[in-house]
Image (cartoon, grey):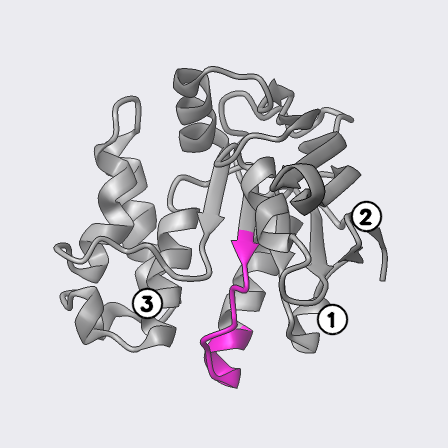
Amino acid sequence: MGRGRALRPPQPGVPLTSADPILRARGLVKVHGSGRAERRILDGVDLEVERGELVAIVGRSGSGKSTLLQLLGGLDRADAGAVTVAGRPVAGASERALSALRREEIGFVFQFFHLLPELDGEANVLLPSTLPGADGPAVAARGRALIEQLSLGAVAGLRPHQLSGGEQQRFALARALVGDPSLVLADEPIGNLDAAAGAVVLDLLRGIADDGRAVVMVTHQPEASARADRVLRLQDGALTPA
């Protein structure tokens, strides 16, 4: 179980006193190919993540870990099963509803950053503050605080091609956290970082969970798994305790 401490005010749609898990997935199935080439990447995966919990998912390359994160966050559609985030449906939701859900409840940290090349680091982080429905000044203030917390102030004016891989990853993390999401989905969040920078990122993710949110991260790094409340292994389409 997590160690939730509601240190920040609840966000709209996320009643932190609720006993319901932030994330619930039931019977997720994802199939690649067809006929004799068909392969079940996910075969009836169940997962619940409570408020205050940091869950690490491990497994060999190609086992479907990134696919699972995409289904949990509504970036891909499952062939069967159901997902809810903060009580709101993911599977079966319209594209408009999914966009609102991702904007209001979910923060993504992608393995390959997905920073916009034409924007500098700070502008990438602050981009969510310009979206419809966002509290622009509050989101921007939080983004600048995250940039400083992640030791990125000196390179905030540089564009992605001028940044190291580790710097790009930290900007991507700041962008994922700037909206204060209920759920953070992180794909190899310290994979491109040295030990010192990785420790800062893990401290931040641990703090997000301890504040009453939830974090699910895919990782190969033992130091990342060691910070989790639970470690699960994805193998042969099934998710089991590691």
Could you say which is closer to the camera, residue 3 or residue 38? 38
Task: Select label 3 or label 1 by which is in front.
Answer: 3
Instruction: Report the span colored magenta.
Output: 186-199
User: Is the Cβ of the residue at disc 3 closer than 8 Å to that at disc 1?
Assistant: no
Report which residue position mark 1 lands on. Answer: 226
Where residue 63 sits: x, y (%)?
68, 58
Residue positioned most to the bottom: 195
Could you say which is closer to the camera, residue 229 or residue 135? 229
Mark with earlier residue (3, 2):
3
Is residue 216 in sight in this rendering? Answer: yes
> What type is the residue that disc 2 sits on?
Ala
Q: Secondary structure at mark 2?
A: strand
> What type is the residue that disc 3 sits on?
Gln
- Cα separation, mark 3 vs mark 1, equals 24 Å
> What type is the residue that disc 1 sits on?
Ala
How crowded pointer 2 is (Cα within 10 Å; few <14, some 14-19, many 20+) is rated as some
Is residue 211 in sight in this rendering? Answer: no
Picture quadrant of residue 13: top right
